[in-house]
Image (spheres, rainbow, N blue to C red):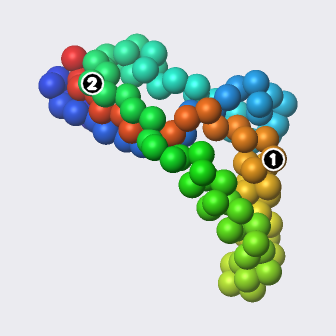
Amino acid sequence: MIRPGGRLAFVAFELDAGRIAGLSVWDDPVGDYRPLLERAGFEVLSYDQLPGWREQVTAGFGAVLAAQETLEAELGEAAARAVVLEASITIELQPYCGHVLVVASRA
C-alpha cells in the first residue's frame, strides 16, 4: 500500500500486443503503463525508455541460446527448456516495444 504522496518506482518491459497475439504467454500485454497508473490514482512523474535496452535484450537472450547445453546440465532439461523457449520466442518475435523506468506518486 502506498500512502498519498508516496512514490512508486519500477522498471518494466512494454509489450507489443500485435506481435504476441495468439500466444499462450504474455496474456495481458501492456504497451504503456501510464494509463494504468493514472487509473489507479498515481501521477506519473517520469517515464523514460532505458537506453540500449533492445541491444541488451538481444545479447542476453542470444547468450541463453548459445549456452543451452550448459543450462540443461545446470538446471535440468525441463527448466532449461523453459528458459530457452522464452529466449527463442523473444529473439524471433521481438515482442517488446520498450523498456521503461517509471516513477509515479500516489495522488
Query: Which residue type carries mark 1?
Result: Glu
* Residue placed most toward the observer, 81 or 90: 90
Quadrant location, the C terminus = top left
Q: Of the two numbered discs 2 and 1 on the same chain, state the one appearing first in sequence.
A: 2
* Residue placed most toward the observer, 107 or 87: 87
Q: Tell me where residue 94 appears, x and y as whole percent.
A: 72, 41
Considering every residue shown, the one lying at the far left of the view is 5
Q: Tell me where residue 63 appears, x and y as whole percent.
A: 68, 68
- Can you identify the residue that label 1 sits on? 92
The answer to whether 14 is drawn above or below residue 36 in the figure is: below
* Residue placed most toward the observer, 99 or 9: 99
**Residue appearing at x 28%, y 18% in the figure:** 43
Q: Is residue 99 left or right of residue 90?
A: left
Whether residue 62 is visible to the viewer of this picture, yes or no, is: yes
Q: Tell me where residue 55 appears, x and y as whole percent.
A: 60, 51
Considering every residue shown, the one lying at the far bottom of the view is 73
Question: What is the number of the mark on residue 45?
Answer: 2
Q: Residues within 10 Å of mark 2 (few under 14, many from 20)?
A: few
Quadrant location, the N terminus = top left
Q: Helix, strand, or loop for circle 2?
A: strand
